[in-house]
Image (tube, rainbow, N blue to C red):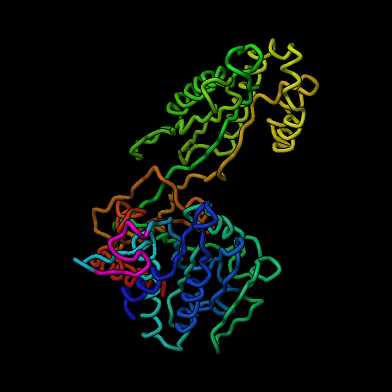
Protein backbone atom coordinates (compact mmCIF):
# COMPACT_ATOMS: atom_id res chain seq x y z
CA UNK A 1 0.00 0.00 0.00
CA UNK A 2 0.95 3.67 -0.16
CA UNK A 3 0.80 6.32 2.55
CA UNK A 4 -2.25 7.82 0.88
CA UNK A 5 -4.00 4.46 0.88
CA UNK A 6 -3.23 4.01 4.58
CA UNK A 7 -4.58 7.50 5.24
CA UNK A 8 -7.79 6.77 3.36
CA UNK A 9 -8.35 3.67 5.47
CA UNK A 10 -7.72 5.53 8.76
CA UNK A 11 -9.96 8.47 7.87
CA UNK A 12 -12.71 5.95 7.08
CA UNK A 13 -12.99 5.18 10.80
CA UNK A 14 -15.09 7.64 12.79
CA UNK A 15 -12.99 8.08 15.94
CA UNK A 16 -14.52 11.26 17.34
CA UNK A 17 -13.82 12.09 20.98
CA UNK A 18 -16.51 14.28 22.52
CA UNK A 19 -17.99 15.11 25.90
CA UNK A 20 -21.45 14.60 24.39
CA UNK A 21 -22.22 10.87 24.51
CA UNK A 22 -24.18 10.97 21.27
CA UNK A 23 -21.08 12.16 19.38
CA UNK A 24 -18.39 10.16 21.16
CA UNK A 25 -17.06 7.11 19.30
CA UNK A 26 -14.82 4.15 20.09
CA UNK A 27 -11.42 3.93 18.39
CA UNK A 28 -11.22 0.13 18.69
CA UNK A 29 -11.99 -0.72 15.06
CA UNK A 30 -9.29 1.63 13.79
CA UNK A 31 -6.66 0.30 16.17
CA UNK A 32 -7.57 -3.28 15.28
CA UNK A 33 -7.01 -2.33 11.63
CA UNK A 34 -3.62 -0.83 12.47
CA UNK A 35 -2.67 -3.81 14.62
CA UNK A 36 -3.46 -6.24 11.78
CA UNK A 37 -1.16 -4.29 9.47
CA UNK A 38 1.63 -4.16 12.04
CA UNK A 39 1.35 -7.91 12.66
CA UNK A 40 1.76 -8.53 8.92
CA UNK A 41 4.92 -6.44 9.15
CA UNK A 42 6.29 -8.73 11.92
CA UNK A 43 5.79 -6.20 14.74
CA UNK A 44 4.79 -7.32 18.22
CA UNK A 45 1.51 -5.66 19.16
CA UNK A 46 -0.35 -5.01 22.41
CA UNK A 47 -3.86 -3.57 22.41
CA UNK A 48 -5.67 -2.67 25.63
CA UNK A 49 -8.63 -0.69 26.92
CA UNK A 50 -8.03 2.57 28.81
CA UNK A 51 -11.66 3.53 29.37
CA UNK A 52 -14.90 2.05 28.07
CA UNK A 53 -14.54 1.92 24.28
CA UNK A 54 -11.20 3.76 24.29
CA UNK A 55 -8.01 1.81 23.49
CA UNK A 56 -4.26 2.25 23.19
CA UNK A 57 -2.08 0.35 20.73
CA UNK A 58 1.59 -0.43 21.34
CA UNK A 59 3.82 -2.01 18.69
CA UNK A 60 7.50 -3.06 18.83
CA UNK A 61 9.88 -3.83 16.01
CA UNK A 62 11.01 -7.48 15.83
CA UNK A 63 14.48 -6.13 16.65
CA UNK A 64 13.21 -6.23 20.25
CA UNK A 65 13.63 -9.85 21.22
CA UNK A 66 14.26 -11.37 24.66
CA UNK A 67 17.98 -10.64 24.57
CA UNK A 68 17.58 -7.03 23.43
CA UNK A 69 14.94 -6.21 26.02
CA UNK A 70 16.92 -7.81 28.86
CA UNK A 71 20.27 -6.20 28.07
CA UNK A 72 19.34 -2.64 27.14
CA UNK A 73 17.69 0.17 29.07
CA UNK A 74 17.26 2.23 25.88
CA UNK A 75 14.45 1.41 23.48
CA UNK A 76 15.42 3.41 20.40
CA UNK A 77 12.81 5.48 18.55
CA UNK A 78 9.14 5.84 19.49
CA UNK A 79 6.59 7.15 16.98
CA UNK A 80 3.45 8.28 18.80
CA UNK A 81 0.16 9.75 17.67
CA UNK A 82 -3.42 10.02 18.82
CA UNK A 83 -6.10 8.09 16.99
CA UNK A 84 -9.11 10.31 17.71
CA UNK A 85 -10.52 13.43 16.07
CA UNK A 86 -12.75 16.32 17.03
CA UNK A 87 -16.46 16.15 16.08
CA UNK A 88 -17.72 17.26 12.68
CA UNK A 89 -20.96 18.27 10.95
CA UNK A 90 -20.98 16.28 7.73
CA UNK A 91 -23.56 18.63 6.21
CA UNK A 92 -20.99 21.43 6.14
CA UNK A 93 -18.32 19.44 4.31
CA UNK A 94 -17.85 19.49 0.54
CA UNK A 95 -17.51 15.70 0.63
CA UNK A 96 -18.10 13.03 3.26
CA UNK A 97 -15.74 13.79 6.16
CA UNK A 98 -14.90 10.10 6.64
CA UNK A 99 -14.27 9.39 2.95
CA UNK A 100 -10.83 10.74 2.07
CA UNK A 101 -11.11 12.88 -1.06
CA UNK A 102 -8.14 14.06 -3.10
CA UNK A 103 -8.34 17.23 -5.18
CA UNK A 104 -5.89 19.98 -6.10
CA UNK A 105 -2.99 18.20 -4.41
CA UNK A 106 -4.75 17.94 -1.05
CA UNK A 107 -6.32 15.02 0.84
CA UNK A 108 -9.54 16.07 2.59
CA UNK A 109 -11.12 14.27 5.54
CA UNK A 110 -11.65 14.55 9.28
CA UNK A 111 -8.35 13.75 10.93
CA UNK A 112 -6.45 13.81 7.64
CA UNK A 113 -4.17 16.47 9.12
CA UNK A 114 -4.65 16.02 12.88
CA UNK A 115 -3.22 13.45 13.06
CA UNK A 116 -3.99 10.43 10.96
CA UNK A 117 -1.50 11.65 8.34
CA UNK A 118 1.30 10.93 10.80
CA UNK A 119 -0.08 7.49 11.64
CA UNK A 120 -0.38 6.70 7.92
CA UNK A 121 3.24 7.73 7.34
CA UNK A 122 4.30 5.57 10.30
CA UNK A 123 2.41 2.58 8.92
CA UNK A 124 4.09 3.09 5.56
CA UNK A 125 7.62 3.32 6.94
CA UNK A 126 7.00 0.11 8.90
CA UNK A 127 5.68 -1.54 5.74
CA UNK A 128 8.86 -0.45 3.95
CA UNK A 129 10.94 -2.01 6.74
CA UNK A 130 9.15 -5.30 6.29
CA UNK A 131 9.62 -5.21 2.53
CA UNK A 132 13.34 -4.65 3.05
CA UNK A 133 14.12 -7.02 5.93
CA UNK A 134 11.37 -9.64 5.79
CA UNK A 135 11.94 -12.33 8.44
CA UNK A 136 15.47 -11.14 9.26
CA UNK A 137 14.26 -9.81 12.58
CA UNK A 138 17.67 -8.71 13.88
CA UNK A 139 18.09 -6.38 10.89
CA UNK A 140 15.07 -4.19 11.70
CA UNK A 141 15.54 -0.72 13.23
CA UNK A 142 14.74 -0.36 16.94
CA UNK A 143 11.42 1.40 16.43
CA UNK A 144 8.16 1.36 18.38
CA UNK A 145 4.75 2.81 17.52
CA UNK A 146 2.06 3.91 19.93
CA UNK A 147 -1.45 5.08 19.02
CA UNK A 148 -3.36 6.71 21.86
CA UNK A 149 -7.02 7.40 22.57
CA UNK A 150 -9.01 10.47 23.53
CA UNK A 151 -6.34 13.16 23.09
CA UNK A 152 -8.92 15.68 21.90
CA UNK A 153 -10.93 15.27 25.08
CA UNK A 154 -9.17 13.96 28.19
CA UNK A 155 -5.69 12.80 27.06
CA UNK A 156 -6.42 9.65 29.07
CA UNK A 157 -4.52 7.49 26.56
CA UNK A 158 -1.23 9.36 26.94
CA UNK A 159 -1.71 9.71 30.69
CA UNK A 160 -2.18 5.95 30.96
CA UNK A 161 0.98 5.20 28.94
CA UNK A 162 3.02 6.72 31.77
CA UNK A 163 2.31 3.50 33.67
CA UNK A 164 4.55 1.54 31.32
CA UNK A 165 7.58 3.00 33.07
CA UNK A 166 6.79 1.19 36.33
CA UNK A 167 3.93 -1.26 35.67
CA UNK A 168 4.36 -4.64 33.92
CA UNK A 169 2.36 -4.97 30.72
CA UNK A 170 0.12 -7.85 31.83
CA UNK A 171 -3.61 -8.53 31.69
CA UNK A 172 -3.73 -8.05 35.47
CA UNK A 173 -2.62 -4.44 35.04
CA UNK A 174 -4.00 -3.49 31.61
CA UNK A 175 -7.67 -4.11 30.83
CA UNK A 176 -8.62 -6.41 27.93
CA UNK A 177 -4.96 -6.74 26.92
CA UNK A 178 -4.40 -8.57 23.61
CA UNK A 179 -0.79 -9.40 22.70
CA UNK A 180 0.50 -10.78 19.40
CA UNK A 181 4.14 -11.86 18.92
CA UNK A 182 5.54 -12.78 15.46
CA UNK A 183 6.22 -16.44 14.76
CA UNK A 184 9.86 -17.33 15.29
CA UNK A 185 10.72 -14.26 17.37
CA UNK A 186 12.55 -15.16 20.60
CA UNK A 187 10.11 -13.29 22.80
CA UNK A 188 7.39 -14.37 25.22
CA UNK A 189 4.54 -12.55 26.90
CA UNK A 190 6.58 -12.64 30.14
CA UNK A 191 9.50 -10.93 28.39
CA UNK A 192 7.15 -8.31 26.94
CA UNK A 193 5.64 -7.61 30.35
CA UNK A 194 8.78 -5.78 31.49
CA UNK A 195 9.65 -4.32 28.09
CA UNK A 196 9.19 -0.71 29.25
CA UNK A 197 9.73 -0.94 33.02
CA UNK A 198 12.60 1.33 34.13
CA UNK A 199 13.54 1.96 30.48
CA UNK A 200 13.31 4.94 28.20
CA UNK A 201 13.45 5.84 24.53
CA UNK A 202 16.33 7.73 22.96
CA UNK A 203 13.88 9.86 20.99
CA UNK A 204 10.09 10.15 20.97
CA UNK A 205 8.39 11.72 17.96
CA UNK A 206 4.84 12.98 18.37
CA UNK A 207 3.52 13.70 14.90
CA UNK A 208 1.19 16.63 15.53
CA UNK A 209 0.96 18.82 12.39
CA UNK A 210 3.87 21.28 12.48
CA UNK A 211 4.89 21.46 8.77
CA UNK A 212 7.98 19.47 9.85
CA UNK A 213 9.02 22.29 12.16
CA UNK A 214 10.29 20.73 15.42
CA UNK A 215 8.73 21.81 18.72
CA UNK A 216 10.75 21.12 21.88
CA UNK A 217 8.76 22.91 24.60
CA UNK A 218 5.26 24.01 25.41
CA UNK A 219 3.28 25.35 28.32
CA UNK A 220 1.06 23.36 30.65
CA UNK A 221 -2.64 23.74 31.34
CA UNK A 222 -4.57 24.19 34.58
CA UNK A 223 -8.34 24.81 34.55
CA UNK A 224 -10.54 25.79 37.49
CA UNK A 225 -14.08 26.96 38.19
CA UNK A 226 -15.03 29.08 41.19
CA UNK A 227 -18.68 28.72 42.14
CA UNK A 228 -20.32 31.40 44.29
CA UNK A 229 -23.51 30.27 46.00
CA UNK A 230 -26.17 32.71 47.16
CA UNK A 231 -29.84 32.59 48.11
CA UNK A 232 -32.48 33.52 45.57
CA UNK A 233 -35.53 35.63 46.32
CA UNK A 234 -37.81 38.07 44.52
CA UNK A 235 -36.04 41.22 43.36
CA UNK A 236 -38.69 43.42 44.96
CA UNK A 237 -37.00 42.81 48.33
CA UNK A 238 -33.32 41.81 47.72
CA UNK A 239 -32.57 41.93 51.45
CA UNK A 240 -34.32 38.58 51.83
CA UNK A 241 -31.66 36.86 49.69
CA UNK A 242 -27.91 36.66 49.11
CA UNK A 243 -26.84 37.85 45.67
CA UNK A 244 -23.92 35.80 44.36
CA UNK A 245 -23.18 38.51 41.80
CA UNK A 246 -22.18 40.89 44.61
CA UNK A 247 -19.09 38.79 45.26
CA UNK A 248 -18.17 38.01 41.64
CA UNK A 249 -16.32 41.30 41.20
CA UNK A 250 -14.09 40.40 44.18
CA UNK A 251 -13.27 37.03 42.62
CA UNK A 252 -12.43 38.64 39.27
CA UNK A 253 -10.24 41.26 40.95
CA UNK A 254 -8.29 38.61 42.89
CA UNK A 255 -7.84 36.45 39.80
CA UNK A 256 -6.68 39.44 37.77
CA UNK A 257 -4.14 40.31 40.45
CA UNK A 258 -2.88 36.72 40.42
CA UNK A 259 -2.64 36.83 36.61
CA UNK A 260 -0.47 39.93 36.88
CA UNK A 261 1.75 38.20 39.45
CA UNK A 262 2.18 35.15 37.18
CA UNK A 263 3.16 37.32 34.23
CA UNK A 264 6.19 38.58 36.14
CA UNK A 265 7.69 35.24 37.19
CA UNK A 266 9.64 32.57 35.29
CA UNK A 267 9.59 34.46 32.00
CA UNK A 268 11.14 32.86 28.89
CA UNK A 269 11.66 34.84 25.68
CA UNK A 270 11.71 31.62 23.63
CA UNK A 271 7.90 31.63 23.84
CA UNK A 272 5.81 33.98 21.72
CA UNK A 273 3.95 34.80 24.94
CA UNK A 274 6.98 34.79 27.25
CA UNK A 275 5.17 34.38 30.57
CA UNK A 276 2.54 32.24 32.23
CA UNK A 277 -1.00 33.37 31.54
CA UNK A 278 -4.24 33.30 33.49
CA UNK A 279 -7.35 33.83 31.37
CA UNK A 280 -10.87 34.46 32.59
CA UNK A 281 -12.86 32.24 30.24
CA UNK A 282 -16.48 32.68 31.28
CA UNK A 283 -18.88 34.02 33.87
CA UNK A 284 -22.25 32.29 34.13
CA UNK A 285 -25.03 33.05 36.56
CA UNK A 286 -28.55 34.17 37.27
CA UNK A 287 -31.80 33.01 35.75
CA UNK A 288 -34.09 36.08 35.55
CA UNK A 289 -34.01 39.85 35.88
CA UNK A 290 -36.53 39.88 38.69
CA UNK A 291 -34.72 37.38 40.92
CA UNK A 292 -31.72 37.70 43.21
CA UNK A 293 -28.89 35.71 41.60
CA UNK A 294 -28.20 32.56 43.62
CA UNK A 295 -25.22 31.18 41.71
CA UNK A 296 -22.29 32.49 39.66
CA UNK A 297 -19.64 30.28 38.08
CA UNK A 298 -16.36 31.87 36.98
CA UNK A 299 -14.12 29.70 34.82
CA UNK A 300 -10.43 30.40 34.26
CA UNK A 301 -7.35 28.64 32.98
CA UNK A 302 -3.61 29.02 33.48
CA UNK A 303 -0.83 28.09 31.10
CA UNK A 304 2.34 27.67 33.18
CA UNK A 305 5.89 27.73 31.84
CA UNK A 306 8.14 24.64 31.96
CA UNK A 307 9.95 26.32 34.86
CA UNK A 308 6.76 26.49 36.92
CA UNK A 309 5.89 23.77 39.40
CA UNK A 310 2.35 22.47 38.95
CA UNK A 311 2.30 21.53 42.64
CA UNK A 312 3.33 25.05 43.65
CA UNK A 313 0.68 26.63 41.41
CA UNK A 314 -1.94 24.36 42.95
CA UNK A 315 -0.84 25.47 46.40
CA UNK A 316 -1.20 29.09 45.34
CA UNK A 317 -4.61 28.44 43.81
CA UNK A 318 -5.77 26.71 46.99
CA UNK A 319 -4.53 29.66 49.03
CA UNK A 320 -6.43 32.03 46.74
CA UNK A 321 -9.56 29.93 47.20
CA UNK A 322 -9.21 30.07 51.00
CA UNK A 323 -8.74 33.84 50.84
CA UNK A 324 -11.87 34.24 48.71
CA UNK A 325 -13.82 32.02 51.06
CA UNK A 326 -12.85 34.23 54.01
CA UNK A 327 -13.86 37.37 52.11
CA UNK A 328 -17.22 35.86 51.16
CA UNK A 329 -17.92 35.01 54.78
CA UNK A 330 -17.12 38.60 55.77
CA UNK A 331 -19.36 40.04 53.04
CA UNK A 332 -22.35 37.84 53.77
CA UNK A 333 -21.96 37.39 57.55
CA UNK A 334 -24.70 39.85 58.41
CA UNK A 335 -27.12 38.10 56.05
CA UNK A 336 -26.77 34.87 58.02
CA UNK A 337 -28.26 36.49 61.09
CA UNK A 338 -31.60 36.60 59.27
CA UNK A 339 -33.56 33.44 60.14
CA UNK A 340 -35.45 33.43 56.82
CA UNK A 341 -32.15 33.39 54.90
CA UNK A 342 -30.57 30.73 57.11
CA UNK A 343 -33.61 28.56 56.51
CA UNK A 344 -32.99 28.68 52.76
CA UNK A 345 -29.42 27.39 53.06
CA UNK A 346 -29.52 23.58 53.06
CA UNK A 347 -26.90 22.08 55.37
CA UNK A 348 -26.36 19.35 52.75
CA UNK A 349 -24.54 21.95 50.64
CA UNK A 350 -21.81 22.22 53.22
CA UNK A 351 -21.41 18.45 53.50
CA UNK A 352 -21.33 18.11 49.71
CA UNK A 353 -18.56 20.68 49.48
CA UNK A 354 -16.55 18.87 52.15
CA UNK A 355 -16.85 15.45 50.49
CA UNK A 356 -15.84 16.87 47.12
CA UNK A 357 -12.56 18.18 48.46
CA UNK A 358 -11.58 15.58 51.07
CA UNK A 359 -7.97 16.00 52.12
CA UNK A 360 -7.48 19.40 50.52
CA UNK A 361 -7.13 22.93 51.80
CA UNK A 362 -10.64 23.54 50.48
CA UNK A 363 -12.12 20.85 52.73
CA UNK A 364 -10.21 22.20 55.73
CA UNK A 365 -11.50 25.71 55.06
CA UNK A 366 -15.06 24.41 54.84
CA UNK A 367 -14.69 22.25 57.96
CA UNK A 368 -13.56 25.29 59.90
CA UNK A 369 -16.96 26.90 59.24
CA UNK A 370 -19.10 23.99 60.51
CA UNK A 371 -21.96 25.32 62.60
CA UNK A 372 -22.56 28.63 60.86
CA UNK A 373 -22.94 27.24 57.29
CA UNK A 374 -20.84 30.06 55.88
CA UNK A 375 -18.49 27.68 54.07
CA UNK A 376 -21.10 26.96 51.43
CA UNK A 377 -20.68 30.33 49.70
CA UNK A 378 -17.61 29.31 47.67
CA UNK A 379 -16.47 26.09 46.03
CA UNK A 380 -13.76 25.39 43.48
CA UNK A 381 -14.07 22.70 40.83
CA UNK A 382 -11.54 21.09 38.49
CA UNK A 383 -13.19 20.63 35.06
CA UNK A 384 -10.12 19.05 33.43
CA UNK A 385 -7.08 17.21 34.75
CA UNK A 386 -3.94 19.33 35.02
CA UNK A 387 -1.55 19.04 32.07
CA UNK A 388 2.14 19.58 32.92
CA UNK A 389 4.34 21.74 30.74
CA UNK A 390 6.94 20.08 28.53
CA UNK A 391 10.55 20.81 27.61
CA UNK A 392 13.26 18.75 25.93
CA UNK A 393 16.81 19.79 26.80
CA UNK A 394 18.37 16.44 25.88
CA UNK A 395 21.13 17.24 23.39
CA UNK A 396 21.55 13.64 22.23
CA UNK A 397 17.95 13.39 21.01
CA UNK A 398 18.12 16.80 19.35
CA UNK A 399 21.38 15.94 17.60
CA UNK A 400 19.72 12.87 16.06
CA UNK A 401 16.98 15.06 14.69
CA UNK A 402 19.33 17.74 13.38
CA UNK A 403 20.89 15.22 10.99
CA UNK A 404 17.61 15.00 9.11
CA UNK A 405 16.56 18.65 9.06
CA UNK A 406 17.92 21.78 7.33
CA UNK A 407 21.14 23.18 8.81
CA UNK A 408 19.43 26.39 9.87
CA UNK A 409 16.59 24.60 11.69
CA UNK A 410 15.26 26.24 14.84
CA UNK A 411 13.45 24.48 17.67
CA UNK A 412 10.13 26.07 18.53
CA UNK A 413 8.49 26.81 21.88
CA UNK A 414 4.69 26.95 21.67
CA UNK A 415 1.79 27.98 23.89
CA UNK A 416 -0.58 25.05 23.26
CA UNK A 417 -0.48 21.59 24.87
CA UNK A 418 0.15 18.09 23.50
CA UNK A 419 0.63 14.55 24.78
CA UNK A 420 4.32 15.39 25.21
CA UNK A 421 3.37 16.53 28.73
CA UNK A 422 2.91 12.86 29.66
CA UNK A 423 5.08 10.95 27.20
CA UNK A 424 8.17 12.88 28.31
CA UNK A 425 8.21 10.45 31.25
CA UNK A 426 9.23 7.78 28.72
CA UNK A 427 12.07 9.77 27.12
CA UNK A 428 12.97 13.03 25.34
CA UNK A 429 10.16 14.21 23.04
CA UNK A 430 10.10 16.29 19.88
CA UNK A 431 6.80 17.28 18.28
CA UNK A 432 7.15 17.22 14.49
CA UNK A 433 4.62 16.10 11.93
CA UNK A 434 3.16 16.55 8.46
CA UNK A 435 0.55 19.18 7.66
CA UNK A 436 -0.31 22.50 9.23
CA UNK A 437 -2.18 23.06 12.47
CA UNK A 438 -4.07 25.78 10.57
CA UNK A 439 -5.99 23.03 8.75
CA UNK A 440 -6.80 20.99 11.87
CA UNK A 441 -10.30 20.82 13.39
CA UNK A 442 -12.01 22.87 10.65
CA UNK A 443 -14.54 22.08 7.95
CA UNK A 444 -12.83 20.45 4.95
CA UNK A 445 -9.72 19.63 6.97
CA UNK A 446 -6.88 18.55 4.69
CA UNK A 447 -3.23 17.62 4.42
CA UNK A 448 -1.21 18.49 1.35
CA UNK A 449 0.09 15.47 -0.59
CA UNK A 450 3.48 17.16 -0.72
CA UNK A 451 3.53 17.08 3.10
CA UNK A 452 2.98 13.33 3.08
CA UNK A 453 5.87 12.90 0.65
CA UNK A 454 8.18 15.11 2.71
CA UNK A 455 7.35 13.27 5.91
CA UNK A 456 7.77 9.85 4.31
CA UNK A 457 11.28 10.88 3.26
CA UNK A 458 12.04 12.28 6.72
CA UNK A 459 10.82 9.19 8.58
CA UNK A 460 12.59 6.79 6.25
CA UNK A 461 15.92 8.49 6.95
CA UNK A 462 15.25 8.87 10.68
CA UNK A 463 14.49 5.20 11.36
CA UNK A 464 17.78 4.21 9.72
CA UNK A 465 19.55 5.94 12.63
CA UNK A 466 18.19 3.18 14.88
CA UNK A 467 19.48 0.15 12.98
- Relative to 221, residue 319 above or below: above
Residue 92 forms part of the magenta stretch: yes
Lateral position of residue 217 relative to residue 411, left or right: right
Lateral position of residue 404 relative to residue 19, left or right: left
Residue drawn at (58%, 65%), measured in percent from left and top? 53
Task: Between residue 434 and residue 350, name the one nearer to us.
Answer: 350
Locate residue 459: give its quadrant.
bottom left
| Quarter of the image that includes the N terminus | bottom left
- Relative to 359, residue 187 above or below: below
Residue 150 screen position, x and y as percent: 51, 58
Q: Residue furthest right?
A: 371
- Relative to 434, residue 99 above or below: below
Residue drawn at (73%, 12%), measured in percent from left and top? 338
In magenta, the rendered stretch is 90-102
Residue 356 forms part of the magenta stretch: no
Locate residue 132: give its quadrant.
bottom left
Residue drawn at (35%, 40%), measured in percent from left and top? 270
Name the dominant secondary structure of the magenta segment: loop
Amino acid sequence: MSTLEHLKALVGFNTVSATKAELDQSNLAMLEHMAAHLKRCCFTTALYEVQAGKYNLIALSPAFDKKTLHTSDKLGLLLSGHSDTVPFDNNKWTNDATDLTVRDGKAYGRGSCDMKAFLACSMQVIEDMHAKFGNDYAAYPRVCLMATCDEENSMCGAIDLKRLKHTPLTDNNFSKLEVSIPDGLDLSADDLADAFVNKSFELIIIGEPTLLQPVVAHKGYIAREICIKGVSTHSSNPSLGINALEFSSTVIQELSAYANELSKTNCDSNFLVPYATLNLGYVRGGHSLNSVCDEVVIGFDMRPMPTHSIAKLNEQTDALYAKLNDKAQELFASKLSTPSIRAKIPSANVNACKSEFVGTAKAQAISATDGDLSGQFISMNIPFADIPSFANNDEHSLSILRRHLPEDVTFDYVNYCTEASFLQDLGPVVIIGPGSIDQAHGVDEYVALSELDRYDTFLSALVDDFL
